[in-house]
Amino acid sequence: ECGTHAIVDAVIGPCTSSEVEFARELISRLSPGMLVLADRGLYGFNLWEQATSTGADLLFRVKSTLSPRHEQTLADGSWIASIRPTSGTGRGGRDPHRVRVIDYTIDGDGQYRLITTLLDPVIAPAKELAQLYSERWEIETTFDELKTHQRGAREVLRSKSPELIYQEIWGHLCCHYAIRVLMADTAAHWGHDPDRISFVAALRIARHSVARGDFPPSRNS
């Protein structure tokens, strides 16, 4: 979740599986009310179709070479288009999907092309969506929190069996989520942006609290 850095779901598997394969499993868990951001390496017609079927809204970056069929230019410079599958058997008989295309350029970083299910430029102006897409990079900060600070730069997964490796990874994810919930609650209480609170400081406080025994075990422990 970009606004709080909370990891709300994850898929874990062997390195022999592709990122797109894992994405298909994760996307099946989307729900209405979400706006999902994704990089251009994940876009594909089948993945897009699967994601839209969940009722979630999508904002994906695609390669600038992708040329959807132009249908209508909107007042904010974005345009309505149809996307179709470009490969696979029977692709000619599949229904297209209407999307809104947003093109813009960032100095020093090249051209961007986004497609979205949000078709109304009044509800979701192109400039706001372009600014919002930059928030996708918040995941890189989250990876740093999880792998560098929480796990430790020199620490590796210690378990020696696949089952325990899975358990250890989920343990790290749950711990990160608990700290981020604490940070989000604190930020909401004081009227601050969760991004303005230091994860390292929150992690240090949490570790100190656990070391002092301020978190009592449950009855079932």
Image: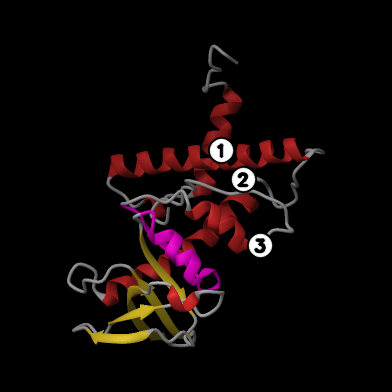
Q: Which mark is residue 18?
A: 3
Going by the numbered disc 3, the residue's amino acid type is Ser
Task: In the displayed orientation, state which residue is furthest to the top.
Answer: 219
Q: Residue at x 54, y 28 (%)?
A: 209
Which region of the structure is painted magenta? 33-54
Q: Are marks 1 and 2 in contact (CB under 8 Å)?
A: yes
| Left or right relative to 202: residue 155 | right
Q: Which residue is mark 2?
A: 150
Q: Which mark is residue 29?
A: none
Q: Residue at x 65, y 42 (%)?
A: 169
Q: Are marks 3 and 2 in contact (CB under 8 Å)?
A: no
Q: Does the segment drawn in magenta span residue 42?
A: yes
Looking at the image, tell me whether mark 1 or mark 2 is earlier in sequence order.
2
User: Is the residue marked by circle 3 packed among few (<14), some (14-19), or many (20+) residues within 10 Å?
Assistant: few
Q: Which image quadrant for residue 52?
A: bottom left
Q: Residue at x 47, y 61 (%)?
A: 138
Q: Which residue is mark 1?
A: 175
Looking at the image, tell me whether mark 3 or mark 2 is earlier in sequence order.
3
Going by the numbered disc 2, the residue's amino acid type is Gln
Question: Which element carries disc 1, helix, strand or loop?
Answer: helix
The quarter of the picture where the C terminus appears is top right
- The percent position of residue 173, horizontal first and vertical second, equals 57, 42
- The percent position of residue 28, horizontal first and vertical second, equals 48, 51
